Image (spheres, grey):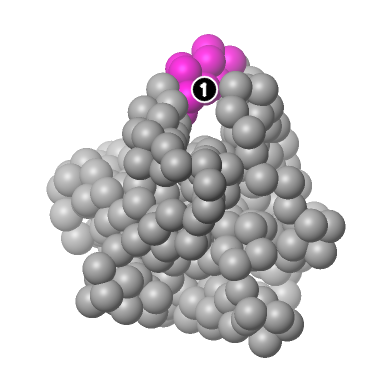
């Protein structure tokens, strides 16, 4: 077990993940255009709703803060697209998972190591240009230094949460012959309950209450709450981070338990 957890054993998987990623550079262009188009539709729709510049509108948002919320939410969505769900499901279907399990390493940690370069590349080559583009087109809220620092910490936790959610989605391949529907459903649920489509403060009371206890809020709305200073002092910031930490720990534990159960029932056919 100690051997499997040595960090140095996972560096080749991270390097290999980066090399594979760079072989398909056109993917960044397609992802960037898609993300920019989606963000433009959402941003300009909500800017029309908040057309009155004299004061805060619904949910206490101003025109600049709602724009910042939606643009950065799209940047986080790009960072969360680590391909883990697709790759785990594909390895299960092809039977390659059997070979992966013979290695003296933890398979979930292998997927994490291979996914981190994807997160970094998506953020640097798609997310940051997207943010710069919209900052040049429309006014955005400039966060306070303390809020920006809290956001960066929260964004790291959101990336870990996204990894766990995607790993669990990919593991659905152990029990179903096609995870396409599962992945599509996951994308819709995450986008809605994370606040990437509609800010959670604008949802009706019952839906907002449900979203507040689900893990998806910690993937976008939580970090954005910190970025925009929409929290009540240190206690409010601690509550946001505590929610993220609790769900991160819970999903890591759930991944470990379900992974052991899935491997125990794994059957691979072929020569």
Is residue 22 rendered to the left or right of residue 67?
Answer: right
**Can I make out residue 164 in this image?**
no
Placement of 129 over or under 224, stated as above or below: above
Identify which residue is drawn at 43% across, 54% down.
Answer: 57
Instruction: Please tell me whether mark 1 sits on a helix, a strand or a loop.
Output: helix
Magenta stretch prevailing secondary structure: helix
Is residue 66 rendered to the left or right of residue 174?
Answer: right
Q: Quadrant of residue 199?
A: bottom left
User: Outermost residue toward the right?
Assistant: 145
Identify which residue is drawn at 79% across, 57% down.
Answer: 144
Residue 97 is one of the magenta-drawn residues = no
Q: Which residues are magenta?
A: 24-36
The percent coordinates of residue 176 (x first, y second) are 16, 54
The percent coordinates of residue 131 (x first, y second) are 63, 32
Placement of 222 over or under 103, stated as above or below: below
Q: Say which of 43 and 156 sits in front.
A: 43
Residue at the spot of label 1: 32
Quadrant placement of the N terminus: bottom right
Q: Quadrant of residue 19?
A: top right
Q: Quadrant of residue 64?
A: top right
**Can I make out residue 148 in this image?**
yes
The percent coordinates of residue 159 (x first, y second) are 58, 56
User: Outermost residue toward the bottom?
Assistant: 235
Identify which residue is drawn at 31% across, 54% down.
Answer: 192
Residue 32 is one of the magenta-drawn residues = yes
């Amino acid at each position: 077990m100690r051997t499997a957890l040595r960090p140095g054993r996972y560096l080749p998987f991270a390097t290999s993940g980066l090399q594979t990623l760079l072989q398909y550079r056109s993917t960044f262009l397609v992802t960037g255009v898609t993300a920019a188009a989606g963000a433009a539709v959402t941003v300009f729709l909500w800017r029309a709703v908040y057309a009155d510049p004299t004061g805060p509108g619904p949910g206490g948002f101003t025109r600049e803060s709602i724009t910042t919320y939606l643009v950065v939410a799209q940047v986080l969505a790009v960072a969360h697209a680590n391909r883990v769900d697709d790759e785990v499901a594909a390895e299960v279907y092809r039977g390659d998972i059997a070979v992966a399990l013979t290695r003296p390493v933890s398979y979930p940690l292998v997927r994490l190591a291979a996914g981190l370069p994807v997160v970094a590349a998506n953020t640097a080559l798609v997310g940051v240009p997207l943010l710069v583009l919209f900052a040049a087109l429309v006014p955005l809220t400039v966060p306070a230094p303390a809020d920006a620092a809290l956001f960066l910490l929260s964004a790291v936790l959101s990336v870990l949460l996204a990894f766990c959610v995607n790993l669990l989605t990919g593991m659905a391949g152990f029990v179903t012959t096609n995870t396409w529907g599962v992945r599509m459903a996951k994308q819709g649920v995450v986008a809605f309950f994370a606040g990437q489509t509609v800010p959670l403060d604008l949802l009706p009371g019952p839906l907002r209450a449900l979203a507040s206890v689900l893990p998806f809020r910690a993937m976008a709305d939580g970090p954005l709450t910190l970025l925009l200073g929409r929290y009540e002092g240190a206690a409010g910031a601690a509550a946001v981070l505590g929610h993220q930490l609790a769900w991160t720990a819970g999903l890591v534990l759930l991944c470990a338990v379900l992974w052991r159960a899935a491997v125990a029932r794994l059957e691979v056919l072929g020569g």
